[in-house]
Amino acid sequence: MPAAMGQTVVIRDTVTMGNLLLIDTDRSFTGQDGQSITPDDPGRSVPGLLAEKLFALDLGIDHLHVLQNTVSIRRGAEWDDDSVNRVASATEEFLRFYSD
């Protein structure tokens, strides 16, 4: 098994507001222009690849907006601790190519 490769994204803070989850990270995923992403149009850039990973969690996520180091995520239901933790974990591991 190869050694761990890549870097862990540090989650500085998460904030929930109803069906919105805001994640503040230590990495910039975009430049000064944000990117809005839906399951029908995930794109292929770095934010699009992150979105694909989050959509695959099957949590009902229907929209993301990525602006520099902040990821705003919307779903049809309010956020619970388990769902927030799953999204945070997937975001933390996004830039890891091999796990420990």
Image (cartoon, helix red, strand yellow):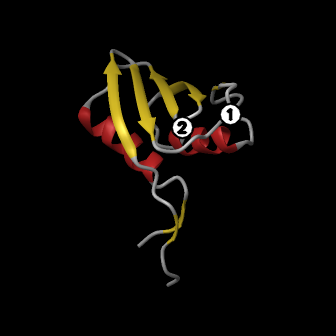
Q: CA distance from mark 1 to mark 2?
A: 22 Å
Figure check: 85 above or below 3? above
**Element class at badge 2:** helix
Between residue 32 and residue 77, name the one nearer to us: 32
The residue that appears at 42% across and 32% down in the rendered structure is: 23
Question: In the image as oriented, which residue stretches furthest toward the top?
Answer: 18
Quadrant where the C terminus sits is bottom left
Residue at position x 25%, y 34% in the image: 81
28 sits to left or right of 3: right
Task: Indicate the amino acid at tag 1.
Answer: Gly
Which disc, if any, is residue 55?
A: 2
Rendered residue at 31%/42% (across/down)? 85
Most extreme residue toward the bottom, as rendered? 1
The amino acid type found where label 2 is placed reads Phe
Q: Quadrant of residue 51?
A: top right
Q: Which residue is mark 1?
A: 31
Viewed as shown, does residue 39 lie left or right of 2?
A: right
Residue 99 rendering spot, x and y as whole percentages: 45, 69
For discs 1 and 2, the disc positioned in front in the rendered view: 1
Residue at coordinates 46% horizontally, 28% vertically from top-left?
A: 60
Position in image of residue 2 (x %, y %): 53, 82
Q: Earlier in the sequence, mark 1 or mark 2?
A: 1
Query: Within 10 angstroms of label 2, few (less than 14), some, or many (20 or more) residues?
Result: some
